[in-house]
Image (cartoon, rainbow, N blue to C red):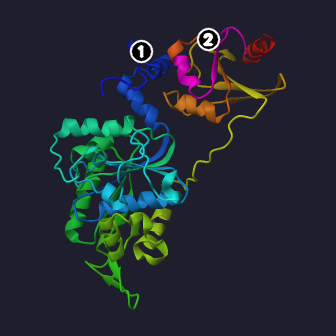
Amino acid sequence: MDKCLHQKDDGSCEGCELHLNSGDDISPEECQLRWVLAEIRHKLMVMSGKGGVGKSSVAVTLALSLARRGFAVGLMDVDLHGPDVYRMLGLGEPLDLVQAQYNLPADLYHNLKVISIEAMMKDRDAAVIWRGPIKHKIIRQFLTEIVWGPLDFLVIDAPPGTGDEPLTVAHTIPEAQAIIVTTPQEISLADVRKSINFCRKVGMPILGVVENMSHLICPDCGKSIPLFTSGGGSRGVQSLEQALLGSLPFDPQIVEAADAGRLTGVDASQSPFLQALDRTVDAILAALGKPEPQKTLPRREAGVLKFAVPLHNGQLAEKLGQDQRFSLITVRENQIVAQEEAAPPDFKPGILPAWLDRQGITHLITAGMSDNARKFFQRKGIEVIDGDPALPPVTLVRQYLDR
């Protein structure tokens, strides 16, 4: 990507300009990445030390399960040499590639976005022969050129091993957490240790380990039949002091549905795999502090104005993030009815406008801002007003109301 998506023809970038106003240096590309990542609450990279452990099946069904619980989910397939996500979901041509929108069942249509290199391939059987720098660029483009919007989860299906793709994710998404998939085989557990060491070296937190294909449920008697060494995965995980998020059985109907592109149509009540996965999702959510789906609430009330004034020593700050706090003033029927102070989580591009929008802010008073930076807030419906930094917030609001 040659320039930030917010960058203008004259080289200016309202996102970068806003960030520079807060006293932090930032490149146009990094600006765009922060803009996107700031609106994603949890980033989960599903990885494995070796192939053949069902990692993609876990990643896809995890994304489906989260979406069906009401979470807004993005599913990003960065297994560039062996992408499987599209085929498992039976996806055809996207309805809107930029929005990562597909013809999905009604209970998933608004909650799930998907991107894979297969969306851009005319021949899905063609071999992808790329070196590291190209793969690095493609993954960053997946993040910056898709309109993900606010997400509760971004589930990233990484290829087996510890190569270019997981490394790019680790460097590009510093908030990502790893879910490592294994089987009860000893050789698979040896590769789990490599994945754990990779995460430690790149500073990626490990949420836990999922033991896949741990057993088979007999369709006649309902008993559990071990497919490999019984409990091997559990013992190995315990020896490595990693949380075991769940043990998933081998389920022939999941294999058949994935091969036929019908995973979205499997009845969870008839699938031992999906029933066990449901408990695994519970464990993942518990490890993340039991988040609830973001609710879309009416942010603004008819007839009510809400002003945000950046503070410094009780007056309008000369720079936007000078004291990292705002005075929030509510006006109803031309009268000030409430005033409070609040601090946003950060002043990075993407975070501050979105935070102000969630507070129901209609007007932002500043000591001066360029036209490009103003547009950054105007996209959220926030009017930017110039004010005198020698005056307190209430006086500035009253001046605006009395004009």
Q: Which residues are magenta?
A: 373-392
Q: Percent x, y for residue 112?
A: 46, 52
Residue 252 showing in the rendered view: yes
The C terminus lies in quadrant: top right
Along the line of sight, which residue is nearer the eye, 249 or 199?
A: 249
Q: Quadrant of residue 12?
A: top left
Which residue is rendered at x = 21% and y = 36% of the image? 134
The N terminus lies in quadrant: top left
Whether 354 is among the magenta residues is no
In primary-sequence order, the first of circles 1 and 2 is 1
Q: Percent x, y for residue 94?
A: 38, 47
Which residue is rendered at x = 42% and y = 76% of the image? 272
Residue 367, numbered circle = 2
Mark 1 touches mark 2? (CB < 8 Å): no
Residue 373, numbered circle = none
Along the line of sight, which residue is nearer the eye, 4 or 183?
A: 4
Along the line of sight, which residue is nearer the eye, 218 or 41?
A: 218
- Amino acid type at mark 2: Ala
205, above or below 359, in the image: below
- Amino acid type at mark 1: Ser
Q: Which residue is mark 1?
A: 12
Give the spatial CA distance, label 1 vs label 2.
20 Å
> Left or right: where does residue 52 sit relative to residue 268?
left
Q: Quadrant of residue 258?
A: bottom left
